[in-house]
Amino acid sequence: MPGNLAPLSLVLLPLVLAACNRRPPADPAFAAEWKAWHDRREERLRTPTGWLALTGLHWLEPGENRLPGLPGTFTLEGGKVTLAAARSDGYALGGAPLERRALAPDSAGEPDRVQLGASVTLAVIERSGRFAVRVWDAAAPARTGFRGVDAYPPDPRWRIEARWEAYPAPREVEVPSVIGVATRELAPGRAHFTVEGREVALEPTAEEDGGLFFVFKDATARDATYGAGRFLSAAAPRDGKVVLDFNRAVNPPCAFSAFATCPLPTPENVLPVRIEAGEKRYGAH
């Protein structure tokens, strides 16, 4: 190579390599569909009883419980939680004043959502036989100051058609959680797919509508995504295939509030590869 061309080649070579490694822009229709989905996701987070508004979680002991910041008493007896308060305490249910009531927990389907004042809502939750009062405040700074969740740019290559391995019968698995209590769920099979030339698999639990729910952790958790893992929902398998759209992988509630009770990935769902798609790390939780 002539001497006067050598410096030019040193300048051009990095540019050529960068151009080769640059991902092509996402299909406009695919990107628009993803943005509409992402906007809806953020709107759900912004609701007055969304994860950003979650400000308290009070575990109950048998008998009468007085909880910080909440008037009245919460009595746990016989698997039921009863709220007793004075009318002047300001509790309401469905717009009507509430003084005494056995509160339906979330394990019963739709929990009773009790209002307190202008911005506070509370409900009873049950986790593996333990009961707690969950508190939301629509005026919480995490909600009022929310500016959105950062995410990787949508990329159709991360919408993967995985091979579905159905188990002969759903098997019971123990799913750990951040509160140290495991729940027993049914796993109907495994999804097999390839990332970076490496075959990996994820084991979901079954949803009531036939869909699949994945709690997984990949190598991006070290530096870019939520450290405890992320969630992904998928439609029911068809013809031995299941579509995993990792562009729609989301942070668990624990990324937005210290008062959530998130499930954690099982050892089988910790992947040694990077899934550079979906939501990135949010906040300090």
Image (spheres, helix red, strand yellow):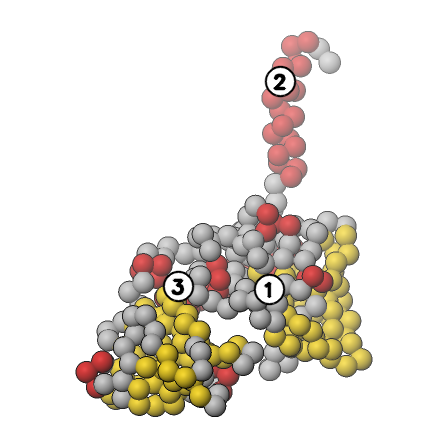
Q: Is residue 75 left or right of residue 174?
A: left
Image coordinates of residue 132 in percent, x first then y, are 44, 76
* Residue 10 to residue 181: above or below: above
Name the residue at the top extreme. 3
First in sequence, mark 1 or 3: give its number: 3
Q: Nearer the viewer, mark 3 or mark 2?
A: 3
Q: Is residue 61 left or right of residue 275?
A: left
Image coordinates of residue 155 in percent, x first then y, are 59, 54
Residue depicted at x 44% and y 65%: 259
Image coordinates of residue 213 in percent, x first then y, are 61, 71
- The Cα–Cα distance between marks 2 and 1, rounded to whole angstroms, is 52 Å
Quadrant of the frame with the N terminus: top right
Q: Amino acid at mark 3?
A: Leu
Q: Residues within 10 Å of mark 2 (few under 14, many from 20)?
A: few
| Secondary structure of the residue carrying numbered label 2 | helix
Nearer the observer, 36 or 276: 276
Residue depicted at x 24% and y 75%: 117
Residue 149 placement: quadrant = bottom left
Q: Is residue 178 left or right of residue 275?
A: left
Q: Amino acid at mark 1?
A: Leu
The image's mark for residue 52 is 3
Judging by the rendered image, the residue that carries numbered circle 1 is 264
Judging by the rendered image, the residue that carries numbered circle 2 is 8
